[in-house]
Amino acid sequence: MYGIIATWRMALEGITEAEEMLKKGSDAKDSIEKAIQMVEDFEFYKSVGYGGLPNEEMEVELDAAFMDGDSLSIGCVGAIKDYANPVSIARMLSEEPVNNFLVGAGAEKYAHRHGFERKNMLTERAKIHYHNRVKETTDNKELKPYSGHDTVGMVCLDQEGHMTSATSTSGLFMKHAGRVGDSPISGSGFYVDSKVGGASATGLGEDVMKGCVSYEIVRLMKEGMHPQEACDKAVRDFDQELKERRGKAGDMSLIAMNNKGEWGVTTNIEGFSFAVATEKEKPTVYLVKFDENGKQYFEVASQEWMDNYMKTRTAPLVRK
Ligand code: ASP
């Protein structure tokens, strides 16, 4: 059995390619790295890699992680600037004996030393988004550093039973310089153990981190829960916990897959989408919906939805 699951529709092209690789016997490390790179490279996805939205100083600072579920090795970068594929730097860091998590200038030096491609990650389009947001603020509209969430996070299982998890994000639009979210934090943005399965998150990093939600899902799967049951329990319980203690809970959307290729997804927001492919299921985008009783269900994205998605992502942007 093999499979790959990822947060958001934007992962579709990447997981489609990864599925082809997995089918031919490629390992979980190469397949997930390729899948994430494809999201990082596509400039119209404005929350990951090239074209990612900048911080409040108009700089694109990226976070990424890579975890090998066999050895439990982890590599991460935080607030790295000007490198094309943070996930690949994270993967290389996961192979180091120590110094596995590097941030800012240190991460950039490491990437430079190892010959990673330097690239200005700030696109003209991202600049327009930035200027428009600044304009909205001066117009005295409410400016929140956070609106919507869009990290790509994946879990992958290859035919040999090896598992990996990886994430990549530009974090919150208009974040402070140096802010790092949950995405490169082990147990929060991602976790994987090939003996069990893996999970990954997108949402308000500051809240996801409070509950180590990815680790919690893996822990519940280890106790015997199906990935769906584990996602439901971890996300619903923690959402409730935050609301009780703090009066509100940030966005949290989690995906998981176990080492049998079974998967689960739970979110506390409207409008979450995810992409999955397994030996039994061709690459598919699902939309998460809620019925009138608030019960979550999945709907395969229609062709119309898919077309509209690409159209809005690539539509010309006007500077206000
Ligand atoms: N989790 C990310 C962060 O807090 C944001 C996101 O998922 O878009 O950095």
Image (cartoon, rainbow, N blue to C red):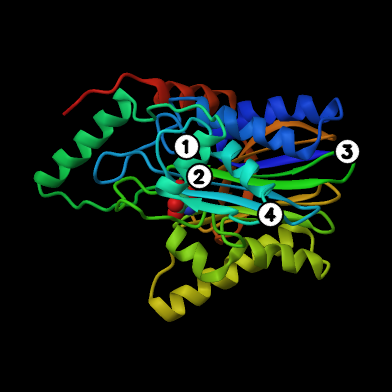
Type of amino acid under label 3: Gln
Is ligand 1 less than 8 Å from the beta carbon at label 1?
A: no
At a point 44% along the width and 74% down the height, the residue shown is: 243
Residue bearing the label numbered 2? 151
Q: Is residue 240 above or below residue 44?
A: below
Q: Count neighbours of disc 3 (C-alpha within 10 A) and say few if under 14, some if 14 to 19, many if 20 or more.
A: some
Q: Nearer the viewer, mark 4 or mark 3?
A: 4
Helix, strand or loop at label 1? It is loop
| Nearest to N terminus: mark 3 or mark 2 | 2
Extreme residue in the front direction: 113
Extreme residue in the left direction: 139
**Of residues 260 and 88, which is closer to you in this image?**
88
241 lies left or right of 299: left
Q: Position of residue 305 (x, y in %)?
A: 52, 28
Helix, strand or loop at label 2? It is loop
Type of amino acid under label 2: Thr
Q: Position of residue 28 (x, y in %)?
A: 77, 39
The span from disc 3 to disc 1 (Cα, nearest Å) is 28 Å
The reply to whether the C-beta atoms of the residues labelled 4 and 3 are less than 8 Å apart is no
Type of amino acid under label 1: Val
Residue bearing the label numbered 3? 159
The reply to whether the C-beta atoms of the residues labelled 2 and 1 are less than 8 Å apart is yes
| Nearest to N terminus: mark 1 or mark 4 | 1
Q: Count neighbours of disc 2 (C-alpha within 10 A) and say few if under 14, some if 14 to 19, many if 20 or more.
A: many
Q: Which quadrant of the rendered structure holds the C terminus?
A: top left
Is ligand 1 less than 8 Å from the beta carbon at label 2?
A: yes
Helix, strand or loop at label 3? It is loop
Judge whether residue 227 can be spotted in this image: yes
The span from disc 2 to disc 1 (Cα, nearest Å) is 7 Å
Residue bearing the label numbered 1? 48
**Of residues 236 and 298, which is closer to you in this image?**
236
